[in-house]
Image (cartoon, grey):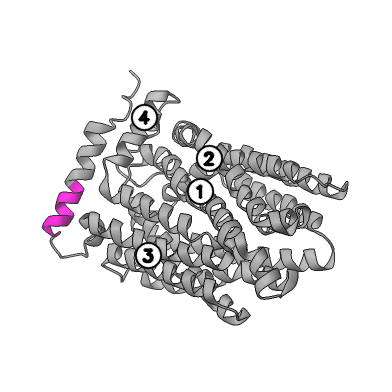
Amino acid sequence: MQAAGILWHVSLLVPPERRPLALGLVGLVRLGPVLAFSMISGVAADALNRRAVMLVTQSLMAVLAGLLALTTFHGLQSVWTIYALAACASAVGTFDVPARQSLVPTLVPREHLPNAISLNTIAMQTASVVGPALGGLIIAHVNVGWVYVVNSISFLFVIAALVMMKGQGKSHIEGTAGNNRGNFTFAAALDGLRFVFRAPLIRSTMLLDFFATFFSSATALLPIFAQDVLHVGARGYGWLFAAPAAGAVLTSAVMVRAVDAITHRGRVLVWAVFVYGLATIVFGLSKSFWLTFLCLAITGAADTISMIFRNLIRQLETPDYMRGRMIGVNMVFFQGGPQLGELEAGLVANWLGPVISVVTGGLGCVLATGWIAARTPELRHYKGDITPPGETPTPYEQARKEDVKAAALQDVQPPAAPPS
């Protein structure tokens, strides 16, 4: 809801001729903190209590949302204040994401992880449907300040859930004893970098994430399409903003049942990103509200499929003591991609128009996906490391297990246990 509110708020504070660049700068101010703190936040998720880290970050984000509301109700006219508060929220979120994502695999058995990731996706995407749609209604009937108020209050429910979550859960992944969680050091951060870039599967999923979101960050230009191309106003903007999440929710519900039955996970991932790029191209060419809504919903469905398998591959291929650092590195890709993409989309839209910006972005996504798939045979042939009962692992699966084990033992050896 707040993401939609900030984009709309910025579009109201700048002249129409400066609107594309101003909307693109929202992505830039969110990217700076990610680049600055992603590595240290990953180390914090491995070295500190992940639940405690989330309690701090959620509290700070509630305060920042309240400050956005306060300055808006006092007649804010400077877009730079919004940029500053958005940057602060991004900095706090940079510490929240590794702690949150690395907490999930410690709460469920390994064999249930695919379903847990799918259910978690449903929870996030359901909120993503309700939030922007409700935000558009609030903006239309009251003003954007109340969007920030509701967002601030919503964090109280997250904090309450964390308080009720007693302990972090026992890890079910081998080699993740509490004393192997890592130390808060620069060397620990470098271990995370080495692990990621020496693992072709993890590296390729991050590159797919980055290029898809960099070239296809159409959401930043939705205010322009809603106002100047489709002429649907704030209410229509809210529904368009929620369309990707609507497609994602329906797909997530299907994936909860289907994820275990899909064996060629690498191929499905590649095709999902390819469809994501194609739907973005059609969205850019559309002059119809319902065709635009459908294309955005397809992007949400395709992104959900790719997100589930990206997360599953990374979680299964990463030891627990390295998981926070892996997610910290990944933040540069999955948050840097859309934020830089928003800036790129704004610059191209300012120069050549919003339609050309979105269409060329979709083409770039398709080409980048083909290049990564061609260069990474490990990804194309990936089926997962959970072999059905009674079957012998394939030579490729056995080789992958040995490669991952060697990387964990040689390249990023966990700290030794303290002397008894």
Labelled disc at residue 34 = 2
**Which numbered mark, 2 or 3, is in the foreground of this view?**
3
Q: Return the residue at label 4.
A: 190
* Disc 1 target residue: 335
| Camera-nearest label, 2 or 4 | 2
Which residue is drawn at the image coordinates 24% and 54% (left, top)? 376
Cα distance between the residues tagged 2 and 3: 26 Å
> Please, which residue is most extreme toward the right here?
74
Percent position of residue 375, x then y: 24, 54
Dot 3 falls on a residue whose secondary structure is helix
Find residue 405 and report its horizontal and vertical position in percent.
22, 41
C-alpha gap between disc 1 and disc 4: 20 Å
Of the two numbered discs 1 and 3 on the same chain, state the one appearing first in sequence. Answer: 1
Q: Amino acid at mark 2?
A: Val
Disc nearest the viewer among 1 and 4:
1
How packed mark 2 is, by other alpha carbons closer than 10 Å (few <14, some 14-19, many 20 or more), is: many
Q: Is residue 358 visible?
A: yes
Q: CA distance from mark 1 to mark 2?
A: 7 Å
